[in-house]
Amino acid sequence: MQKYEEETRDLLYQRVYAILWVGIILIPLFTFLDYVVVREFTKLFFIYRISCALAFLVLLFFYYQDVGRRHPYVIAVMAYVIAGFTISAMVVNLGGYSSFYYAGLLMVLVTFASILPLDVTQSAITGFLLLLIYCVPIFVFSTPTDEGLKVFFNNMFFFITFIAISAVKCYEDTKARQREFNLRMELDSLSERLSYYAHNLEDEVEKRAKALEESELRYRELYENIIDMVILVDRNNHILMANPRFYECIGIADTENLDVTFMSIVHPDDALLVEVRMVAQLLEENDVKDFQFRIMNREGITFDVECNARVIKKDSSLIGFQMVIRDITERKRLERDLLESYRHAQNARAATIVGLAKLAEYRDEATGAHLERIREYARIIAKELANKTEYKGYITPDYIDDIYSSSILHDIGKVGVPDSVLLKPGKLTKEEFEVIKRHSSLGGDALKAVESQIEGKSFLTLGKEIAYFHHEKWDGTGYPKGLKGEEIPLSARIVALADVYDALTSKRIYKDAYTHDKAKEIIVSDSGKHFAPDVVEAFLLHEQEFKRIREELLGEEPQATETAVTP
């Protein structure tokens, strides 16, 4: 406790120096405030301020004397009182009870409590001392008024609040200094204990050496029997040390003199990759994790491996690398088999879709390469819409692949339309048109039935939407449901335009093929009526691609009859 009090007194002595210089410099500087706010009192207040600063200089003289070192708190309180009476005199000159210059006293209070290491008692005593310095001159030299008393009461309220806040602040600061002091005492105690242990290091070193030997034996046992290859390599790629698993894999007897470089066991096709992606990283002192490549043993057998390598340093200098190499040949084989199975499944899926689509195409041979063109058009529009903010996260690469594959199922329902209607050479009656309109519901129902047998969302989901709704119109006049606007699934909106463009630009028994520009004119005129505006916009951005695909895939259209049905 005595040591703590000595430290506090030394700290107080240092801070008093700061207090005195703050008063000497700042109190005269506030003359600028007097000149702006109370210009008629500038000269008088300047005399007060200079007198206060001179008094602080006198206290600074005593501060440097022996008395100042022994009683720094006394000097601080004297400075505090002088500053308080200086400002109190100004308060009286400016009306006393209603003077706003009392704020200067609050500044003195806060400065004193913030800079000096006071405890809560000292803070409270000095705070109320300053309150008396404020109140007594006012009571003696000022005449109260009703308005003045209200202002005075207001000032007193804030004054007492500041005293309380300063006391709390000093209380917390004192606790913090005590905690810091106690921690230093504990550190000193630990240092003494460490010094004691230093004299008994011989026994401790012997115990640790024995423990290290046991640990080394356990490590060596693990090193010898681990299923992974472990090697130590120097900066020049020379293998310095390896475990038995490495010798076994490479085909070297562990009794042979190991004179092998790391790069000599790397498969030639992977040598450049290993140099750039692994060795170069290690030479830059970066560890390598899960790096995959191939190695070859002396018999020419290739192994797929995965390597984790770390840098070994001595005295901050790179001396080599430790590598743990795992044989993943079987895992890579399984991955390749799985990938091949996935490719087969994808091919089977594509074949299934094409087969379903051809059911309708075979009954309506006049369509030619219609399906191939439709899916190309649909993919172009979907890829463009994917750039729009509103479709971010919805139109994914998988979505684009699915709409490319499934768009050709749009007319699958035509297999349920009688030949007498589907292949009628003339114009349809109203009743016949109602029959052919059923193809959208028939196709959607068929794909829905198949989809229900598949768990989760499948490639048929978009196909079902397209089959059901590709004849819906943006203004709600389409069929089969009369859906309007965004009620129509996006996939159906896309295929609706692709289907109409292809129908317009293809030759049919009842009409010649329209030019690209004529088809474009019709589609633009139907924007917001038949077609979604953003789908039309995507079409216009890529119309030249549509034109190119049409020219490449149009071919020679068969001259079979087809029902004169508008798209």
Image (cartoon, rainbow, N blue to C red):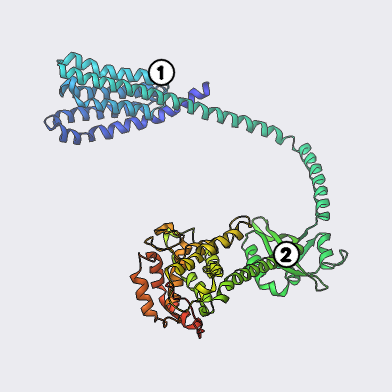
Q: Nearer the viewer, residue 27 or 166?
A: 166
Label 2 element class = helix
Q: Is residue 512 above or below residue 493?
A: below
Q: Residue 324 location, x and y as percent?
A: 74, 59
- Which numbered circle lies on residue 435? none
Q: Residue 536 location, x and y as percent?
A: 39, 68
The answer to whether residue 462 is visible is: no
Give, as a three-letter code, the residue at label 2: Lys
Residue at 24% x, 21% y is 154
Q: Which residue is mark 2?
A: 332
Q: Nearer the viewer, residue 3 or 89?
A: 89
- Which numbered circle lies on residue 121? 1
Taking the image as shown, residue 241 lies to the left or right of residue 427, namely right
Name of the residue lying farthest toward the left: 40
Q: Quarter-wise, where is residue 381 in the image?
A: bottom left
Q: Residue 538 location, x and y as percent?
A: 41, 69
Q: Counting other residues with Cα less than 10 Å from the Cα at mark 2, is it few (<14), some (14-19), or many (20 or more)?
A: some
Q: Counting other residues with Cα less than 10 Å from the Cα at mark 1, is it few (<14), some (14-19), or many (20 or more)?
A: few
Q: Quarter-wise, where is residue 119 in the image?
A: top left
The answer to whether residue 148 is visible is: yes
> How far is the residue under mark 1 from the one under mark 2?
77 Å
